[in-house]
Image: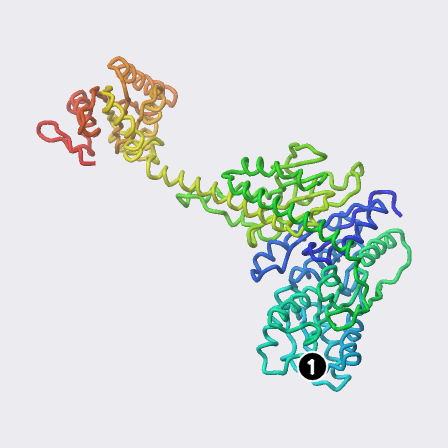
Amino acid sequence: MPDKHIHIAVIVSTIDEEYQSGILRGVRQFAFANNITLEHFVAFGNIGSDIRHDTGEYNIFSLADLSQFDGVILVINTIQFADCLERVLERVRASGIPAVCIDKNVAGTYYIGIDNEMAMHAMVEHFIVKHGFERINFISGPADNIDSVQRLKAYKDVLNKHGILVEEERIYHGRFVSRDGVDAVQKFMNSDLEMPQAIVCANDTMAIAAVSALMHHGVRVPEDVAVSGFDYIYNARNYAPSLTSVERPLERVGQLACQKILNHLAGKPQERESMLDIFCRFSQSCGCCEAPVMDADEFKRRNFTVLESFTDDVSLASRLSSSLAECDNLEEFVENLRYFIPDLHCKEFYLCLCDSWRHGVTDEQEERYPVPVLSANDYIVNGYGERIVVPLAYRNGRFFDMPDFAAQEMLPGLFDEKNETGNYYFVPLHFRERCMGYCVIKDSNFPTSSKLFHNIVMDIANSLESVRKIVRLDKVTQNLNRLYTIDPLAGINNRNGFRIDTNQLYSYCMEAQKPVMLMFLDMDGLKRINDTFGHKAGDAAIMSMAEAIKRACTGGEVCCRFGGDEFIIFAADYTEEQAQSLSERILECLESLNAEKQLPYKLAASLGFHITVPEPGTNLFQLVTVADNIMYAAKKKKKTSRYLKHGKDGEVDTDL
């Protein structure tokens, strides 16, 4: 056996099912005894009808750089996505490392399996020979699953062997999930065929649901209809009635998978294929009681432990979901999530996000669109991009800062020889098919022992998506507000912005009888600048004028580009001396800009201000009119504003 640490990758989906957890329990037992580190890449696929969810889940398998591992174990029949499965196998072949496939014989890999046909053959024959049944229905699994195909074939072969007609209407094609048992019974009840004497199921999960559905319809098991399953899981053994099923040595499968990899690394000769013995356990659901029954006290103790753990997990999931739902930004999200990490009872936890998650706007889009949208480059479906950021890292009871890293590392220091051996779980974070990142958990029983582990991971992912949407909507709102209130050329308020920013101040001064100041400014010579140097130079002059005004307004004044080359400034509770000082600062700033920028023209402006205590019913823009008249008088024969139309007596149209 090599002296260096051994790292074995485990590719598996839906680890909260007993079939998977039994195999993984055996893998972990062997790994612990032989100082092997396991890196589980875990998906939760086939839990609904939305293929986008499966795409997001199975993407986690693309994270595993298998070339860095010493071997890989594939619990291959748990991946109900043919394209994904083929991509995983391609990566395995390309890595060149020893691989063990469980329950699917793949060329170029070691194979551990059972004789599905022999096991199902014995089960169906038991119903025919022992019980004398001829009307036997069958609930099958997916058509592209080898276990399902072999078990269905055995069912048909045994019926043919005994001269019993195979009727397709007596067969229900499911997906190995609980709902299939319910739907299959409903189909059989609605059929014109005579009720079956027995229902044979391709796994225990569907069989338990079928028994429950039959009882719901008033059909007794086994008195009216006998039922059998396959796998002999805990719930099947301890259901009422206890389920007739096929027992398979799941823990032994996991142990043997690890052993094959170690044998390969040590150069020990071994068989490529290993077929393990299985046993039919005939129990109450078929009318036989040959299978052993768990001691009642032991059953009570175990069920109490399971129920207590489940209650704690429900509380954790509820509190976490509620806490994360309150977050408006990533900082709040991380801070709230930190509180719950110790409840996972893990040695290490990492929240790893694709670098693109914090992006979403490209420079090109900023130019093309008035509001930001998610860039196609940031909409990752396959893989995890180039860089990973870690906003939350936890190790041995403390949180710490971890720098970002290349996605191909999976996790910095993962293969460091100084690390203690253990069990890592890499779990995807996604919204539908769009990848956000992943979580990494080390040495925690929570992923395999809790039925709510996936719910908690989904809560984390969904809350991240909510945070992203809130942040994006805030930015959209800011941009829309900017479009509505900010002059895009001058970078200061337009008329709408001026109205909004001065409304409360003006109302306060009117109620408190405080003076307000309105200053009107008009650039000198803008037409000459445009005619002589072009409109770009004219735009630059307007921006410089706005810059001078912003520099000068240091006392809470509100400034605005009123239109064209005209600007206005408002100030509350202002004195004559303050207004005069502001005028001088503006002119000084213009002179400074002339010196700094060395423009081919001189920036200059005419201005006038008006201070008064506003009377009830007085419109703010009526005061703008007065200020404009004062400026206009100072400007004398210069061109009047194109935006404020002066009458014979100097009055201005205030209908804005």
Total numbered labels placed on residues in the image: 1
Q: Position of residue 542 (x, y in %)?
A: 31, 30
Q: Which residue is mark 1?
A: 135
Q: Is residue 466 visible?
A: yes
Extreme-bottom residue of the structure? 163
Q: Is residue 621 above or below residue 184?
A: above
Q: Is residue 327 above or below residue 565?
A: below
Extreme-left residue of the structure? 648
Q: Is residue 427 left or right of residue 69?
A: left
The residue depicted at 60 percent of the width and 76 percent of the height is 189
Q: Is residue 639 visible?
A: no
Q: Is residue 184 above or below residue 630?
A: below
Q: Is residue 126 left or right of residue 554?
A: right
Q: Position of residue 369 (x, y in %)?
A: 41, 45
The quadrant of the picture occupied by the C terminus is top left
Q: Position of residue 520 (x, y in %)?
A: 23, 25
Q: Position of residue 501 (x, y in %)?
A: 31, 30
Extreme-top residue of the structure? 577
Q: Quadrant of residue 300?
A: bottom right
In depth, the one of 111 and 201 nearer the eye is 201
In depth, the one of 482 and 447 nearer the eye is 447
Q: Quadrant of residue 642?
A: top left
Mark 1: secondary structure: loop
